[in-house]
Amino acid sequence: MTEPAQDQLRAITHGTSYAYNRLRCRCDACRHAELRRQKEWRARNRAGLVKHRPNHPNCVPVRVRGVIYPSISVAAATLKICPTSITGQLRLRGSADGAGLGGRSPRPRGKAGAKRCVIHGREFPSIAAAARALNVGYSHMAREFKAGPSAEYWQYLLSKLMQADQLQPGRLA
C-alpha cells in the first residue's frame, strides 16, 4: 500500500493562508485569513516595503514613459499604480507608456473588419454608419444584410435614404 501524502496526515490549522493556498481549504476562517494577507501585502506594496528581487528569472526590465525600471513591480511601486496596469498596457498596446495616466485611450474609429455597405448607390464605411445615417436600428439592419435584404426592406431603406436627404440642407439626391 502507498503511504498518504504528508499534507493529508497533518490536521488542518484553520484561519491561515497556508491552509487556504496549500491545503485548499475554503472555510470562512481560511478565506478571511487569505483576504487579510492580500490586503496587508497590497498595503506594504503601496508603501514600497515589498522586497523586489532583481535577480529573479521572471524579473525583466520595463520602460514606462522613457524611464527604464528593473521590473514591473518596481515601476508600479515608483509610479504608485497597480502592476496589472502596466502588464495590461504591455499586453494590449505593446508599450507601457499609458499606464497610470487614468482614463482609457479612445478607440480608433473605423474598425479594420468593418463591412462596407452600398445602399441604392450610396456607399457607407460600415453597416453601423449606414444605420446611423438612415436613423434605423443597427441590429435589424445587420440581420437583414446577413440574410440578404428582402425587396420590402430595400424599399424601406430607400424611403429612409430619401428622408435623410431631405433633412440635410444642400444635399442633392
Image: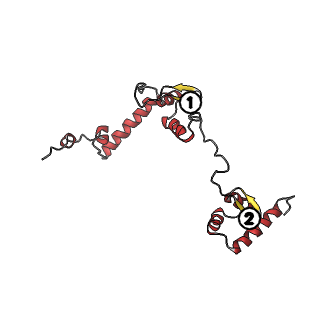
Looking at the picture, does residue 124 appear above or below residue 77? below
Looking at the picture, does residue 4 appear above or below residue 129? above
Q: Is residue 38 left or right of residue 81?
A: left
Q: Whole-percent x and y of residue 136?
A: 70, 64
Residue furthest to the left in view is: 1
Q: Whole-percent x and y of residue 71?
A: 47, 28
Query: Mark 1 vs mark 2: which is more N-terminal?
Result: 1
Residue at (57% x, 39% y) in the render: 93
Dot 1 corresponds to which residue?
A: 64
Tell me the distance, in whole angstroms, between the alpha carbons under discs 1 and 2: 47 Å
Q: Is residue 160 left or right of residue 102?
A: right
Disc 2, SS: strand
Q: Nearer the viewer, mark 1 or mark 2?
A: 2
| Count of numbered marks | 2
Residue at (64% x, 68% y) in the render: 144
Disc 1, SS: strand
Dot 2 corresponds to which residue?
A: 119
